Image (cartoon, helix red, strand yellow):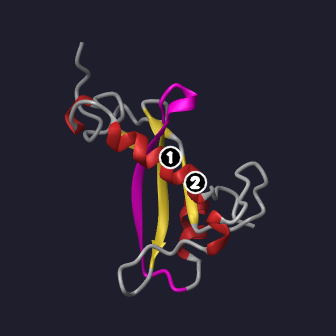
Amino acid sequence: MAVNTICLDTAVAWTTAWRAQDGSFKDHKDLKAFMIPHEDLQEVLAEPNVVNVRAYIGIDVANDNAPHLIIVGINEAGEDIIYAAAGEGCDDEDGTVNTGLYDFSDPCPNTCDTTSPLYGPQKG
């Protein structure tokens, strides 16, 4: 069972909302990174025909613009591997349908390593 999979409608809504935000990428200063659990990344890589992964950024406008990292496997031709189930009556709450779309929503600043040189200096 793919624990962190989401429906295509949800992924499209979140990525569309991210792209529709006013301002530029530099305006999103608070979001620094995402923590991806080892087990979750293994689950994506274990999908059939996955040779690489792609990460999309999204926000959930219905949940105070909560940031999401959506990861999808990529096949040898460089195409996203999204299963038909992702758009056919998919229920995000069910958790039993493997859509090929994984939601990794452990964003930094909540899961940061503030001692990392990649975190950078805090600005007031």
Res. 35 visible in picture: no
Residue 23's place in the image compared with 7, above or below, is above
Magenta stretch: includes residue 58:
yes
Q: Which mark is residue 33?
A: none
Count of numbered circles in the view: 2
Toward the viewer: 117 or 75?
Answer: 75
Q: Position of residue 51 (x, y in %)?
A: 43, 82
**Which quarter of the rendered picture does the C terminus lie within?**
top left
Q: Position of residue 90 (x, y in %)?
A: 71, 59
**Which quarter of the rendered picture does the N terminus lie within?**
bottom right
Q: Separation of disc 2 and disc 1 at Cα?
A: 6 Å
Whether label 2 touches label 1, CB < 8 Å: yes
Q: Tell me which amino acid carries mark 1.
A: Ala
Q: Is residue 88 left or right of residue 100?
A: right
Q: Position of residue 78 (x, y in %)?
A: 35, 80
Residue 113's place in the image compared with 98, above or below, is above
For disc 1, the neighbor class at 10 Å (few under 14, some 14 to 19, many from 20) is some
Q: Position of residue 84 (x, y in %)?
A: 63, 74
Please name the residue that numbered disc 1 is placed on: 13
Res. 57 visible in picture: yes
For disc 2, the neighbor class at 10 Å (few under 14, some 14 to 19, many from 20) is some
* Region in magenta: 49-66
Q: Residue at x 56, y 62 (%)?
A: 101
Q: Tell me which amino acid carries mark 2.
A: Asp
SS label for mark 2: helix
Magenta stretch: includes residue 39:
no
Q: Which mark is residue 9?
A: 2
